[in-house]
Structure formats: structure tokens, C-alpha cells
Image (cartoon, rainbow, N blue to C red):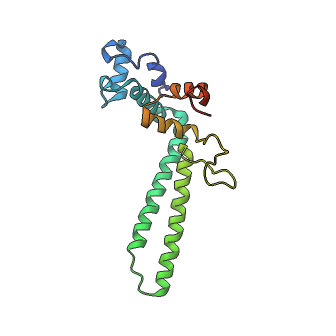
Amino acid sequence: MTTFASLTATLDGWYDKLLSELPGAIQERVREDFFPMPWDMLSAEQRQSVARQWDYQNDPTTETDRQYWWDFFIKKGELEKQVEQWESVAAPTAVELAEKERRLKALHAELARMQKHQERARGDYLPAPVGSTSATPNEPHRYIAYPKALRRLEERLNATPEELAAWIFMGPDGGGIAA
């Protein structure tokens, strides 16, 4: 059994370099672990993202988590197939129609529950304040979960976690964001 060696840690300080500028051992590791993605065609942020993904996929400490999500999506796919099957079932009698509707309702409820769980896990979920459905004028800032904020800022501005930390540090009065 080989020991896990973090690709993220190995590449720390090298993300902004061309492949030819990396030491030989690191070049070899990049060629192997980044395959088929060409190092020189990725930005430093993309390289770091790939390294983090590689670490997650290969770190033995994440095996339980990876297995959980594998099973989760297998079950979700099976439920979606069942929905398709039940939607295509003919229900010529009232009893059969009632059974079809009951089954579809239960399947849709389970899929909705799974969708909410998935959103919470990736940071999409933010409960509304009690007694409120949206931000009010008395509420100066609307907060969202860190993973969701980071994902949105990465998509819109190609922001890094470090930049998000700086914006939080600056605060809303200094041109940053509230946290």
C-alpha cells in the first residue's frame, strides 16, 4: 500500500509556473496526475482546483464521504427511473390511477428531500429568518453560506478563497463584503 501524498501540498508555490519551470519530479507528477489536462493551458486557479479535486479523489480519509455520495447519486438515479416508469404506466381504473398518483407523490417527495440535502451539503441552503421570506430594509446584509458565496464569486469573478477572505476582512465599509 502506498501512502497518500497531497498533490495540493506538492504544488504549493508552483501553480503560477509553466510545466518546463517545475522540478523534474514535480513535472512527472503533474503529467501523471493531471492527465489528460495540459498544465500550461490552465490558469493558476484552475491548476489549484484540479489538485484539490485529485486530493479529494485519492485521499483515503475521504473514502467514506466519496462512498456516501456515490450511493446517494445511485439511489437518486434509481428514484428518477422509477418516476419515469410510473409516469409511463397506464392507469385505466380509478384504483390504478390512485396507486400511480400515490407512488409518484412519494417518489417526488423523496427526490425533493434528496435535492435539499444535496443543496445543503454544497452550501446552496440558507434558511429564511423566522417570520421573514426575504431581506427587509431593517436587515442591512443578506448572508449566504461560505461555500455558496465562494462558488458564486468563482463563477462570476474567478475569485480565489484568499480574495474572498480579503473582502471579508475589508468589510462592507471598506469596499468589501459582510460576513
Of residues 135 and 103, the one drawn nearer to the viewer in this rendering: 135
Q: Is residue 142 left or right of residue 89?
A: right
| Above or below for 2 versus 118 | above
**Residue 25 x, y percent position in the rendering:** 37, 15
Give the position of the C terminus as an image quadrant: top right
Q: In terms of image quadrants, where is residue 22?
A: top left
**Residue visible at 44% across and 66% down?**
82
Horizontal arrangement in the rendering, residue 42 relative to residue 132 (left or right) = left
Query: Which residue is at the far bottom?
Result: 93
Q: Could you say where residue 64 lies in the image, as x and y percent from the top left? A: 55, 41
Using the image as rendered, state which of residue 51 and residue 170 is in the foreground: 170
* Rendered position, 100 above or below 43: below
Front in this rendered view, residue 35 or 159: 159
Q: Position of residue 7 (x, y in %)?
A: 45, 24
List the single residue furthest toward the front.
137
Number of numbered markers: 0
Q: Nearer the viewer, residue 63 or 22?
A: 22
Residue at image location 48% in from the left, 34% down from the top: 56
Is 155 drawn above or below residue 87 in the view shown?
above
Residue 165 point in image, percent of width and height: 56, 27
| Residue under the image location 39 percent in, 26 percent down | 47
Q: Residue at x 39, y 29 (%)?
A: 46
